[in-house]
Amino acid sequence: MSTMNISLPASLKSFVDDQVEGRGYGSCSAYVRELIRRDQDRQHLRSLVLEGGESEPAAAADAACFETLRNRVRHYSGE
């Protein structure tokens, strides 16, 4: 695993420390890794939405279609 040093102002360092302690992360690094993973997931979802918006419609969007989309969003958001 590679190492990266990050400089933070005291207020952000305090916030990170509180998140680590209050949310059960093992370390500051674990918290930052989780934030990065979530950002990667958001970027991936955004690219899928943009790709879909640029594509030709394949079928009518009925209730079942929207339920499938809701399930995908729930899956990506961790619900």
Image: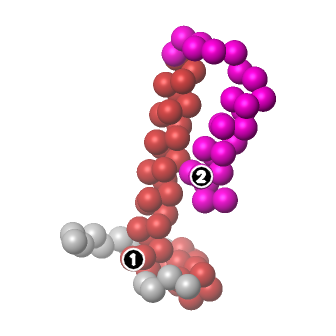
Left or right of 27 in this view: 63? right
Query: Magenta stretch?
Result: 55-79
Callout 1, which amino acid?
A: Ser
Residue drawn at (57%, 21%) of the image: 53
Kindly tell me whether residue 14 is visible in this rendering: no
List the residue tagged with mark 1.
29
Residue at the far left in the pictured view: 2
Callout 2, which amino acid?
A: His
Q: In which quarter of the image is the N terminus?
A: bottom left
In the depicted view, which residue is nearer to us: 5 or 43?
43
Note whether 77 is above or below 60 in the view shown: below
First reached walking from the N terminus: tag 2 or tag 1: 1
Left or right of 43 in this view: 72? right
- What is the total number of numbered labels drawn onto the structure image? 2
Q: Is the magenta stretch mostly helix, strand or loop?
A: helix
Q: Where is residue 57 in the image (x, y as percent from the top left)?
A: 59, 13
Residue drawn at (69%, 15%) of the image: 60
Note whether 32 is above or below 13 in the view shown: above
List the residue tagged with mark 2.
75
Q: Does the magenta stretch include residue 69?
A: yes
Note whether 3 is above or below 48 in the view shown: below
Circle 1 SS class: helix
Q: Position of residue 59 (x, y in %)?
A: 63, 15
Kindly tell me whether residue 3 is visible in this rendering: yes
Residue drawn at (48%, 43%) of the image: 43
Left or right of 14 in this view: 26? left
